[in-house]
Every structure is written in structure tokens, then in C-alpha cells.
Amino acid sequence: MLLFVLLVGAFGAEEDTALCEILGSPEFPLLSKEGDITIGGVFSINSQISSPPLTFTDAPEPLKCSRYHFREFHFAQTMMFAIEEINNSSSLLPNISIGYQIFDGCDSNLPSTRAVMGLINGPERTLEKTCSSHLSVHAIVGASESSSAIAMLQISGIFQIPVISHFATCACLSNKKEYPYFFRTIPSDYHQSRALAKLVKHFGWTWVGAVRSDNDYGNNGMATFITAASQEGVCIEYSEAISRTDPSEQVTRVVRVIQSGSARVLVAFLAQGEMEILLEEALKQNLTGLQWVGSESWITAGHLATKGYSRILTGSLGFTLRKSKITEFWEATFGCSLQSSPHGQTQCSGTERLQDIKNPFTDVSELRISNNVYKAVYAVAYAMHNMLKYRLHELYVNFTLQSGERVYFDENGDPTATYELVNWQRNQAGDIVFVAIGSYDASLPNGKQFTMIGINTTWAAESLESVCSESCLPGFRQAVIKGKPICCFSCIACAAGEISNFSNSAECSRCQLEYWSNEDHSQCVPKVIEFLSYGETMGVLLTAFSLFGASLTLVVSCVFFWFRHTPLVKASNFELSFLLLFSLTLCFLCSLTFIGRPSEWSCMLRHTAFGITFALCMSCILAKTIAVVIAFKAKRPANTVPQCSAPLQRTSVLSCTLLQVLVCLLWLTLAPPFPYKNTAHATERIILECDLGSPIGFWAVLGYIGLLAVLCFILAFLARKLPDNFNEAKFITFSMLIFCAVWVTFIPAYVSSPGKFTVAVEIFAILASSFGLLFCIFAPKCYILLLKPEKNTKKHMMGRN
């Protein structure tokens, strides 16, 4: 509902034909002035009311208001000043004078209601049967409290008289269905309550106490604060309510609850009257050391700062309206002019000291709420001006004051919600001053609404922390304690592989697959990559044994080459022996491909080199065994020459080896081995290994070698009755037994060994089987060649023991 439309209704109200009888005496305004248009004002110039007892036999005695309130009188002064300024203006409502009638609301609902009745009816008695005539006021400015404003609206709303409040902040008043004739120049408590929640969260206070006025203002504001605080992760230890009508025992109990609580921050959503009652009791019980967070109702109340309450309230924080300047107030207070004056009046410097003026009436340093009164009067004047000048039926109130401040109402009759964060600090003289240290603008995006401006803050205590539980350090998570608020928790260390990298983490985050938690569980670090390297002890030992085996094989080759013309070497098949020694050298060296960081080429090389070299080795042994069996089993030695000739031996060795090469080529073509990061076997490290690609290919290679070994063993076993002095088949049998035993043992060890030990087991099997073949087949021959040369004769080799 637009303000000027309501004023049309107020101007055009017709006489009511209802009969009435006046009971009691009419209300008279404290301050009044005649005018063409009259604006009513209701301010709590007295803040205490004494209600006489009701006997129900006699008429009730008049209500008595006391305890003069300088701040509210200042609001009345502002209203009168604004009206005078408008009357003296030639551009706003020209040739029309504005009058006023200002009543005392006594900071209570009943006097505020009587004030509205006085504004509507007027003070004149009538002898006619109809006691109402044209309305005496066209708009009302007031009241300072939400409860009083609601009580006024119950009456004024019937007559469609707009009420513009300067200080009633209850969010409930934004309901246009219930209060269609209400406007205000102060933001709704909805925004202030949310700002207070962000404030306590900003300073890390997650455990706070709360006290409120037991009325619409306090109950609605605190309800919004508690909801917003819960969203911000702030918990309320207790929430108490007090009223000016409460007995002293109730106030005493509330202060004891505050004093016994563990929260060191108290959010006080109180009207000025309840705040004074609470502070009086707090002084009696010596309630100190609390960080007070206040609502706009009392946070800039100068009379609280001048009393003994400053000992309790120093360091208080709270949001209030932005400070404004009404230049004429300043000029009237100090008797100077802010602009150049042709009449020789003293020029204002802007640094005049209020300490030189000890009159509460003339304190113009904190024009916050007074400026709201000023804007309310101008809002009425502009609405009337537009209505009378343009004769429009729809027009929003939207204007700019002389100070440059823009005034308008939204669809709920509320202004823009902008606040200053003030801090109670002491100046050099020891007096309390309200210092702006931050701001809140509800129109900005979330996250940018609340800002600090970097000014030093005064605190209620040197070390101020208000939490239910001590903060959980990084590496721990919060665990809510059953039956307690979420702000009360225990700290539990993150599990292995999980971290929390900031304090008070609600849960631990699991590291990514290739990362692991550090010792403090505060950050994820790359997992240790594990593989058998040349730099570790196991790698060095296996490398040494591999090179030693290859070197020893070369030495044996040299010995055989040196004694190549002797009967023993000739009987051992010199060509096959050298080919076998060559393959054994490769067997020892192929184990080196299993050491080091796996790569695509090394993974393919290690298994194929192992398979081909051992296939060559087994092929040579198989050819030797066949040659020995054929040579000593033949009934006609002459017929054995074609069967065991060198070309035939070479062909058999080559054929058996090429078959293994074919298997390896198929394996590498279809599913070659590749480097693989194994994260499943060990959680805290990555095992870098060679994936077989195709297990069938690996076991086919290994199975083919086993097949050749079994054939060698069977043939050597059949040749066990050969001459004792040259029973090479016996040594081949022993070597095959060792070879098969090693590789049969290798299979379960290979499957069950973790990480790099799998590779070590495979290398050990290669070396063990290679050493077994070398020693069993060539050691006896080297013994005779080097140490028993007398036995290196054809006669001795053909003889028996």
C-alpha cells in the first residue's frame, strides 16, 4: 500500500453516524502546533509508568508517567525541527503549513493506545450524539517500540491512518496483510538478527547466551537470530526473557543464569527499558567479564554510557543505523554556521567539542534514530506534496534529503537494511564513545554483506573465547556428544588415509587414490612408490649374485675353451656345452631386467628374456641328454653318428627355442606386460609392478620351460646305468631335480609375496635354478680339468668304479 493513497483515505474520511458516549477525560498532547495539515507524534518521553490498583468500584485513577527520557525527547525535538524546516521551505508544500500534536507513550502499550485515541478524536468535547468528526491527524510518527506500534495500529488501522515508525523493528510489522497502514524508516529486525548471527560467527563465538525483551520486538528478533545462528553453526546455551513488569526475583534469576553459564558472549536483544532493569541487577551481582552484543535499541543509547553501566558494557558490539548529520542541529548547538554566513556568524570548524556542552538535550553527535524521525516527517510531507500537486492516484514515496540520503519504502513499507557495527570504546578523557568498526548491507550478495574496516576493537576481556568445546586441531574431526548441542563435541583423530586441513572440521576427507595422509593427518602427501631398486640392500645383493653367476659362467667357459682338446671336454659335446654356458650367462643377466623402475620396455623384456633364455638352456640340456642316451644305448655305435650329429643337435635346440619365441611373440602381440600402479595391495604405498597383461601368456612360457625340464629329467633318469666315470646323465638328473624343486616352490611364493618381494622371489628362482644347473653339470668337469688332470683320459672315462 502506497503512503500517499493512505493519506487520501485520511483526508477523505467521512463522518460516522454511529452513536457513542464519551467515558473518561480526553488526552491532551504534550506539544502541539496548529497547521493546515496535522501530523501526530507518539514518543516515550517518560519511560516508567505506575499503574494504580483497579477496584472496579470507582473510576480508575489516571496513569502516572515518570523517569524522564532525554533520548525520546530528542526525537520529539527532531520532529518539530523537521516540520519547521518544511514550513519554511518554498519548494515543499508551498502555502500549506504543517502542525503537530506530540503525545507521551510512556514506553507502554496502554498510554500509546490512549495517545492514538487522543490523536483521532481530538481534545474537544461534543454535545452531539455523534462524537466523531473529521480526523484531527493525517499521519502518525511513532512509536519507538514494536509492541507499542502494534497496539497503536490496532486503533489507527480502523481509520486507515498511516503510521510511520522510526524505531519499531519487529519483522512481524512487515506483514502487509495484517498491518497495511504501517511504514518505517528503520530496517526490519529480520536483517539485524541475521547480521548479529554473522557477527558472532565472524569472531569465532560458537557458544553464546541470549536474553531478550518478552514482547514482540524481543521474541521475534531473538527467534530470527537463533535460526540464523543455527545456520552459521552457532549454539545458544540459554535463552532468557525479561519484561519491565516482571518481579525483581525473575530478573535476579536471569542474571544468575547468565553468571553461571559457560558462554562468555551475551546477545542482548532488549529494549532500552528492559536493558536498564537488567543492568541494575547486573551491577548488584557484579556481572563482569562478558562480551555484550546488543541490538540497535540500546547499543547507541548515550544515557547508558554515562551511568555506572559503562564498567559492564565497555567493549560492547552491536549494529545500529548509520550516523547522519542534520546540519542545522549542529549549527544551533554550537552557535556557528557550516556554510559561509553574510551576517558575520562564526564559521563552524567541524571539530567543536561536545564536552563543553554538558546538556543531554543538545547532544547531536549520534543522530542515528533521530535521523529516522527526520526522514519519517519528510516522507509524510513528500507524499502530501505529490498528492496535492499532481493529483495522482499512484505514486511511490521516493526522495532525497538535503544530506544526500535517499528515502524510499519497499513493498513491505521497509527501507533498505544497512547498518554500522559500533564498538564501545573509551577516549582519552575516559568517556565512552561509539566507534564504527564495520558495516552490514543486506542488499549485497551473501558473503559480502558483513565487512570490517580495520579499526582496533576494544574487548570486554583480554582473552575472549566463547566455545562449548576447545577447537579441534587439523588432523582431527568433531564428534557430537550425544544429548548436547552440535557446538559441544569431542575431537577424534582422522583415520589412516584421511585428513582434515583446518580447525574444527566436521569430517575427515579421504585422500585421493595416489595420496596418503601424513603423520599429523593434516594434508595428503604422495604415496611412497615401491619397487625393487638398485639402491636398496636387496637390490644390491641380487645384482651382485647375478653378476657373480654370469662371471663364474664365463670363467667356466674359459676353462672349457682352454681344455677343449682333452677327452673330457670332447666327450661333453664341446659345442652344446658352450651354447649351454652362453644361455646360462644370459639367464644370470636377465635377472637384472627385474630390478629398477618398471617401464613399458622393461616389463616386456624381463619376461620374454627370461622365457627365451631358459628355453634355450633347457633345449641344450635336452639335446645333450638325448645325445648321451643315444650314444651309450646304441648296439651299433656306427649307426649313432647320424642320429646325434651336430647339425641335428643344432636343429633340435633351435626348434625348441623358436617355439618359445613364438609363444612370447603371441603374448607381446595380444596382451603385452605393462607397468602398473598397484594401490589395492597396500593402502599407504603404491607398488609399481609389471602387470602380466595376459596371465595365460606368462604361465604358457613358464609351462613350456617346465615341460622341457621334465623331458630332460625323464631321459636323464633312463640313462642312469651309463659308465660311472662319465655318468653325465646323473648330474643332469640332479640339476633337473634342483631346477624343478626351485620352480615348484616359486609358484606359491610368487603368488603370496607382497609388493617388491614378488620380484625378489622371481629373481631368486632364476638365480637359484641357474646356479643349480651350472654347479651340477659343470662343477664335476671343472674339478677334473683343474684338480684331477690324471683322470682326463679316455680310458678313465669309459671305466667303472
Image: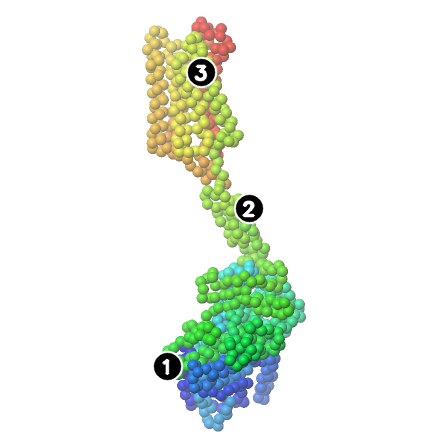
Counting from the top left corner in percent of width and height, residue 25 is at: 54, 89
Q: How far across and how far down the image is residue 677, in percent?
A: 44, 38
Instruction: Give amino acid for label 2.
Output: Asp
Q: Considering depth in this image, is 663 or 536 the residue closer to the camera?
A: 536
Q: Which residue is mark 1?
A: 390
Marker disc for residue 557: 3
Q: Amino acid at mark 1?
A: Tyr
Residue at point 46% right, 94% down? 128
SS class, disc 2:
loop
Q: Secondary structure at mark 1?
A: helix
Q: Residues within 10 Å of mark 3 (few under 14, many from 20)?
A: many
Q: Quadrant of residue 333?
A: bottom right
Q: Amino acid at mark 3?
A: Ser
- In contact (CB < 8 Å): disc 3 and disc 2: no
Of 778 and 519, which appears nearest the observer? 519
Question: Which comes before the other along the chain, label 3 or label 2?
Answer: 2
Within the image, what quadrant is residue 624 found in? top left
Give the label, 2 or 1, closer to the camera.
1
Q: Which residue is mark 2?
A: 520
